Amino acid sequence: MCELLGMSANVPTDIVFSFTGLMQRGGRTGPHRDGWGIAFYEGRGLRLFQDPAPSCDSRVAELVQRYPIKSEVVIGHVRQANVGKVCLANTHPFVRELWGRNWCFAHNGQLTNFLPSPGFYRPIGDTDSEAAFCDLLNRVRTAFPEAVQEEYLLPVLVEACAHYRRLGVFNGLLSDGDWLFTFCSTKLSHITRRAPFGPARLKDVDVIVDFTAETTPDDVVTVIATEPLTEDETWHRHEPGRWALWRGGECVSEGHIE
Amino acid sequence: MCELLGMSANVPTDIVFSFTGLMQRGGRTGPHRDGWGIAFYEGRGLRLFQDPAPSCDSRVAELVQRYPIKSEVVIGHVRQANVGKVCLANTHPFVRELWGRNWCFAHNGQLTNFLPSPGFYRPIGDTDSEAAFCDLLNRVRTAFPEAVQEEYLLPVLVEACAHYRRLGVFNGLLSDGDWLFTFCSTKLSHITRRAPFGPARLKDVDVIVDFTAETTPDDVVTVIATEPLTEDETWHRHEPGRWALWRGGECVSEGHIE
């Protein structure tokens, strides 16, 4: 299994604090030694940092922790391999271009006997996660060769997630840089931070941050993770089957499947 | 205009030395202040480091210079913007998946009035370079929906390059992680280093490396750049219209178009 980290914010925000917590789970406080990755949208561009080495020892992870990259949408992942060997091509998040946008995806869970029919998008590595991402994009592209609004897109995403969930565990984060889509198959929690901001303490390492010093009163920042990252804040646990669409830190659409 | 850097080697080789020279041209010894990027293949995976900031001031470039990433195929670029604003989405190299492989491309030059017909691959940013890359992949995909050997692929690549060259300047580097394809429209030079290795001195910054200490007798490493990077070695200048395919540091196929 793996750990996921997502962020949606209404202003470019750095995620160093949450990332520092997540990275500890990559071999120090958690067993996820098989690589890590984090993607930061910057306009329509995407910065992707990845390493098949454990995040707690990674020089690239060290850079990301020291170099606050500000972004409105972030997707991060630390991996404990179950399907696919430990190598860069099997390291989340995965990225493909669709409709002239960068689509990015990370997965927690495992799909059993997942053999999607080949389509336009094809996996580069050999994980079930990347295969599911390609299948999902092939579904979207088949349904809509040209870009559509979220009201049309969401039913296709939700139906695909319902399908994957029947094959195993499928907690996932997906973004096109504008919105962040989350699906909870077994575990996902979020916290939305807004004024008045206060301090927070990481669970996995002795770090406290006072968000008052880091924010302005209008900032809205939602952080989503497989497990809560701080110990003195109230995280909202998602029910299995819950999906949500986030934009600018706010949940703009949500629903539930049985 | 921009500067290109490519490498093809028969063993995973670090390119820190050449990269250090190239980075100086990003605002120090050259005018290419509008971003830089470098892609390292690692198996079928690809590490991409990019920054729209000048390379000589970039913290990410600093990391890449201090952290020797070993790779058999590398594509690097420093940019001086002419088409498209300075932002991450317009920063070379560009990457797309085709046939389940990462394809990577960087361009030096400018194409005038380049408006390719829309196809499957679409530009994310607004450079002529990314538009040409998408057009090239659309041509390959249209000709060959499934992967083919290079003997079939090369005529499609060469014909596309001939077309782009008629529209302006098109020096380009393209790879699928296995081979490196180079096209010289106006300027491109290469050097193939093999035993006996000796020392070399960078043109752009006072750095000398003794490759004897860094290599084994069987290593073959070809470096390709728009302008020679060292001052005490003999670089081979490509004639305008020359294309070449490199694998494991060796030129395995080449040709010339008028």
Image (cartoon, coloured by chain):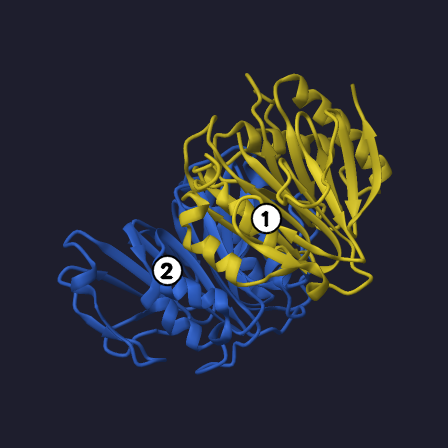
Chain colours: A yellow, B blue
Q: Residue at x 48, y 30 (%)?
A: A126
Dot 2 amino acid type: Tyr
Question: Is B34 in front, or is B183?
Answer: B34
Residue B153: x, y in percent? 46, 43
Q: Residue at x 81, y 63 (%)?
A: A217
| Discs 1 and 2 carry the same chain letter | no
Judging from the image, mark 2 belongs to the subunit labelled B
Answer with left or right where residue B166 lies relative to residue A58: right
Dot 1 amino acid type: Leu
Question: Is B195 in front, or is A90?
Answer: A90
Judging from the image, mark 1 belongs to the subunit labelled A
Gap between marks 1 and 2, in whole Å?
A: 29 Å
Q: Quadrant of residue B227?
A: bottom left
Label 1, on which residue? A202
Question: Is B62 in front, or is B210?
Answer: B62
Q: Residue at x 62, y 36 (%)?
A: A227
Is disc 2 surrounded by few (<14), some (14 to 19) or many (20+) residues within 10 Å? few
Residue A155: x, y in percent? 81, 30
Is disc 1 surrounded by few (<14), some (14 to 19) or many (20+) residues within 10 Å? many
Q: Secondary structure at mark 1?
A: loop
Quadrant assignment for the C terminus of chain A? top right
Label 2, on which residue? B67
Residue B245 in view: no
Answer with left or right where residue B15 lies relative to residue B122: left
Question: Is A253 in front, or is B155?
Answer: A253
Residue A8: x, y in percent? 72, 49
Answer with left or right where residue B129 lies relative to residue B149: right
Q: Secondary structure at mark 2?
A: loop
Residue B195: x, y in percent? 15, 59
Residue B25 in view: yes
